[in-house]
Image: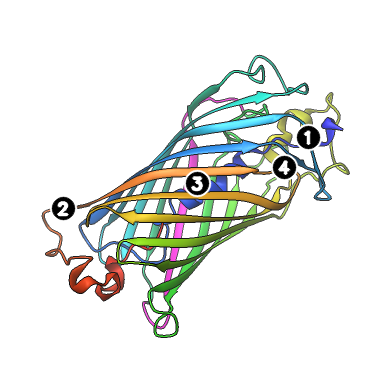
């Protein structure tokens, strides 16, 4: 029954946005005066919905696409700041729209949420550990009550840490990193659906310029509506806000590749899909394509070539950028 579904589009955006900015949110930080600008195109397709018991069913097709602009900058050798401002559009095609005209089969979009994060390099050995704090805040009055909504129109504060380690000498040219975050969300109708998220990445440099990576992202929502048990009727005020306060859980898996065209220009691509979920939309396919450009301010230290002596791993960890 379609009336059992939630329309938590933002929750399915979370992983892809995390993948797109994982480099800027990673354990390693850029040196003082250095930074990176990344532009990422994302195309997300939903064919299935999840009930609270994890069963998939068809309630219409959703396509979201947009651009994520990210800036990462090293304020000091240990403190980095990151900002991003996505712009998205979405459309729904099906016989069970939440409301019209937004779910009428045409694209609707706008700026989404401004995000800001600060992270601090606490330790470098034996594990790189980087705590962080950040927030997201809606910057436009977009509609949240729609299958094709681009977000949930809620603010969120995140606390957590990144941990990483290069795997040599056991596995030269490989690395692993993990990110845990606890999200404190805006309260709606007495419900505050706080969340725990874990993102992991394993990467391997096939050459000094070419890297491949495996990605996993998961979320557990600690409080929220469960379907079908807690699903409100269409006359209940909770129905209008179920997109915002559902207990959405998921496990998404994916992979990616990146290629350093020059020391400052990198191209990257990732693909992800949902393998399990509850109370939300399944991410059937999530594609990200983008490019990043590294820059240096006049007060930055003299550059160190990323490809000197033919090995990307001869640079110090602060200069390493194993992401996207």
Q: CA distance from mark 4 to mark 1?
A: 12 Å
Q: CA distance from mark 4 to mark 3?
A: 17 Å
Q: From the viewer's perspective, is 9 left or right of 322? A: right
Q: Are marks 4 and 1 in contact (CB under 8 Å)?
A: no
Q: Which badge, 2 or 1, comes first in the chain's sequence? A: 1
The residue to which callout 1 is attached is: 58
Q: From the viewer's perspective, is 315 left or right of 215? A: left
Instruction: Point out the residue furthest to the top here.
Output: 101
The residue to which callout 2 is attached is: 297
* Label of residue 17 in the image: 3
The residue to which callout 4 is attached is: 280
Q: Residue at x 15, y 63 (%)?
A: 303
Helix, strand or loop at label 4? It is: loop
**Do we see residue 24 in this rendering?**
no
- Which of pointers 2 and 3 indicates the residue nearer the eye? 3
Q: Which badge, 4 or 1, comes first in the chain's sequence? A: 1
Q: Quadrant of residue 263?
A: bottom left
- Which of pointers 2 and 1 indicates the residue nearer the eye? 1
Q: From the viewer's perspective, is 245 left or right of 309? A: right
Where is residue 191? Give x, y as percent: 72, 44
**Do we see residue 199 in this rendering?**
yes
Q: Residue at x 71, y 32 (%)?
A: 241
Residue 180 sits above or below residue 82 on the image: below
Q: Which residues are magenta?
A: 124-143
Q: CA distance from mark 4 to mark 2?
A: 44 Å
Q: Quadrant of residue 99?
A: top right
Q: Which badge, 4 or 3, comes first in the chain's sequence? A: 3
Q: CA distance from mark 1 to mark 3?
A: 25 Å
Nearest the viewer among 114 and 309 is 309
Give the position of the C terminus as an image quadrant.
bottom left
Helix, strand or loop at label 1? It is: loop
């Amino acid at each position: 029954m379609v009336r059992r579904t939630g329309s938590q589009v933002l929750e399915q955006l979370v992983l892809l946005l995390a993948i797109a900015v994982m480099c800027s949110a990673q354990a390693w930080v850029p040196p003082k005066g250095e930074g990176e600008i990344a532009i990422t195109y994302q195309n997300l397709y939903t064919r299935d919905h999840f009930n609270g018991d994890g069963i998939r069913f068809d309630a219409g097709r959703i396509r979201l696409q947009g651009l994520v602009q990210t800036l990462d900058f090293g304020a000091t050798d240990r403190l980095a700041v990151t900002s991003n401002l996505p712009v998205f559009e979405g459309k729904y095609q099906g016989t069970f729209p939440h409301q019209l005209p937004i779910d009428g089969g045409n694209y609707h979009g706008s700026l989404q949420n401004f995000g800001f994060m600060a992270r601090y390099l606490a330790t470098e050995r034996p594990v790189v550990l980087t705590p962080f704090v950040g927030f997201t805040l809606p910057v436009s009055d977009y509609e949240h009550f729609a299958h094709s909504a681009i977000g949930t129109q809620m603010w969120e504060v995140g606390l957590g840490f990144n941990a990483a380690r290069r795997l040599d000498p056991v596995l030269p040219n490989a690395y692993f990193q993990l990110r845990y975050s606890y999200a404190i969300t805006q309260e709606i109708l007495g419900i505050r659906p706080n969340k725990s998220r874990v993102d992991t990445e394993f990467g391997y440099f096939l050459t000094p310029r070419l890297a491949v990576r495996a990605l996993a992202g998961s979320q557990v929502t600690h409080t929220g509506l469960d379907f079908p048990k807690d699903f409100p009727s269409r006359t209940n005020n909770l129905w209008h806000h179920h997109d915002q306060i559902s207990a959405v859980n998921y496990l998404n898996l994916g992979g990616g590749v990146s290629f350093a065209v020059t020391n400052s220009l990198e191209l990257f691509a990732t693909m992800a899909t949902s393998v399990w979920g509850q109370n939300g939309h399944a991410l059937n396919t999530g594609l990200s394509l983008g490019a990043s450009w590294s820059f240096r301010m006049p007060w930055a230290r003299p550059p160190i070539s990323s490809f000197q002596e033919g090995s990307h791993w001869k640079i110090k960890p602060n200069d390493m950028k194993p992401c996207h």
